[in-house]
Amino acid sequence: QFDPHQLPDRSTMVHLFEWKWDDIALECENFLGPKGFAGIQVSPVNENVIAPKRPWWERYQPISFILTTRSGNEQQFANMVKRCNKVGVRTYVDVVFNHMAAKQGGQAVGTGGSRAYPENKDYPAVPFTNADFHPSCGIQDYNDAYQVRNCELVALRDLNQTIPHVQNKILEFLDRLVDLGVAGFRVDAAKHMWPNDLRVIYGSLKNLNTAHGFPPNSKPFIVQEVIDLGGEGIKRDEYVDLGAITEFKVSAAIGKAFRGGDDLKNLKNWGEQWGFLESSKALVFVDNHDNQRGHGAGGADILTYKQSKPYKMATAFNLGFPFGITRIMSSFSFDDTDQGPPKDSSGNIKSPVIQKDGSCDAGWVCEHRWRQIYNMVEFQNQVKGTEVGNWWDNGKNQIAFCRGNAGFIAFNLESFDLNQDIQTCLPAGTYCDVISGDKVGSNCSGKKVLVGNDGKARIIIGPNEDDGVLAIHKGKKL
Ligand code: ARE
Ligand code: CA
């Protein structure tokens, strides 16, 4: 359950937050596959409550395990997974089974048309009844592990995963997704469930579907949402032998560094020495759907698309430095933190509109379609398996390093020029900087970097340029 089952020459997944299945299928074929993305994380696939004004977070309130949401129905989901697998893009589903929907103002109606009665803990479309839940109490003290796991997270009805019927219903749901060809799961609120119950559930899962290209006996990839910034009753270590973990320490530390709260030179030993989990167990990201809007963890350190220059720099570092299983966030734009995705007057989610230059419109940000980001996805694939070499820094906020003899990257967060001869470790020649531009035919629309016979090149990044990064690799030699 630690292997994300990505193609050997691919490395990163992208969270297409609130996208519709039909749109994702097209995105896999038209963009993600060709650009070398390894996978997608999708929003919860099972029926959720319809909440007033359709906030994004209604999808974290399950009504049943019927696969119908605003993103589409089961047949559309199945079709999407198949088409994405065909172009080498794996699907990871955000699965919510710590709880069911909270009490609503009135009757709870789901996106699949099912009714539920959360005040009585009655969800007939599963079915779950009162006996399947923990007695109601609130989580007041995150130092009390019992409370965190047996009480209600923000009033959400708390399932008791020790009960065989509950385990069986969860397993039926997860196994159905495995049958449809998914590669794994993001387990929502894992820290709110007992590790031993999760062990039973994960241990009983089906192997991945070989008809979708997975080798026989492959276990679904599991990444557990365990927020542990230190100092609470529940430790990520209790979950590490069960699957990968969302490493929120990375999100907070990378945001802080690229906001100028920490010298970039300190990133030299990025990894376990920073208190992060070991690389193969850590899911790492600059922001996620919670902390980009002040939910979850990380607070004011978190960078998002709204601070585009440092955000792109942080993303380039996250993809450029060999640490963790990487994930990119792809958002819709928002002002209000409850606001859901772009919708029409009937509440249906609107499709993103792709403009001539490849960027998105109609309320979708599509960070994954920003050149500086998707070109770093290619960089990461090109340097896969290499180590960091020839670290250089100016003693503060200018840094550069090689990735084997395959790639080189430099950052400037100072208010003055970076203008230096630096060792790039690349064979002599002219390379196209994939941040300021791209290789077009045999030319480069951005900066050209001339690497000499000694492997050195003059690297220039001004403080007022659009981007504070420069990246070259063997795949974009002129
Ligand atoms: C909404 C309303 C609530 C209302 C509730 C029920 O906002 O006011 O009471 O509905 O009617 C998301 C939203 C919630 C939303 C919920 C259900 O964020 O606002 O509630 O959906 O619709 C903790 C958990 C962690 C959780 C974060 C957000 O440990 O698991 O809080 N993250 C996941 C998802 C969320 C989702 C849920 C869980 C629920 O990613 O999107 O909630 O399914 C410290 C602790 C952390 C704690 C953090 C914030 O850092 O260490 O453990 O995270 O504080 O409290
Ligand atoms: Ca619980």
Image (spheres, rainbow, N blue to C red):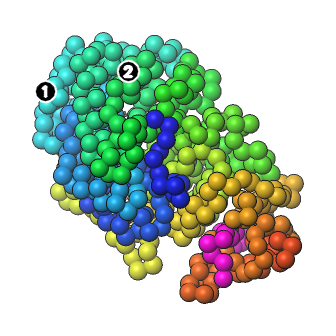
Q: Residues within 10 Å of mark 1 (few under 14, many from 20)?
A: some
Residue sitting at x 36%, y 52%:
213
In this rendered view, identify the residue nearer to me: 347 or 254: 254
Give the residue type at disc 2: Val
x and y percentages locating residue 137 in the rendered image: 36, 15
Residue sitting at x 26%, y 46%:
180
Res 240 seen here: yes
Give the residue type at disc 1: Pro
- Mark 1 highlights which residue? 124
Secondary structure found at label 1: loop
Give the tally of numbered discs. 2
Left or right position of 2 against 153: right
Mark 1 within 8 Å of ligand 1, using the beta carbon: no
Mark 2 within 8 Å of ligand 2, using the beta carbon: no
Residue 193, quarter of the rendered image: top left
Image: 383 above or below 228: below
x and y percentages locating residue 100 in the rendered image: 27, 28
Q: Residues within 10 Å of mark 2 (few under 14, many from 20)?
A: some
Q: CA distance from mark 1 to mark 2?
A: 25 Å
Image: 170 above or below 48: above
Q: Is residue 475 magenta-colored? A: yes
- Mark 2 highlights which residue? 200
Task: Name the image quarter holding the C terminus.
Answer: bottom right
Mark positioned earlier in the residue sequence (1 or 2): 1
> Which numbered circle lies on residue 161?
none
Residue 31, quarter of the rendered image: bottom left
Mark 1 and 2 residues: CB-CB less than 8 Å, in contact?
Answer: no
Image: 422 above or below 219: below
Q: Which residues are magenta?
A: 463-478
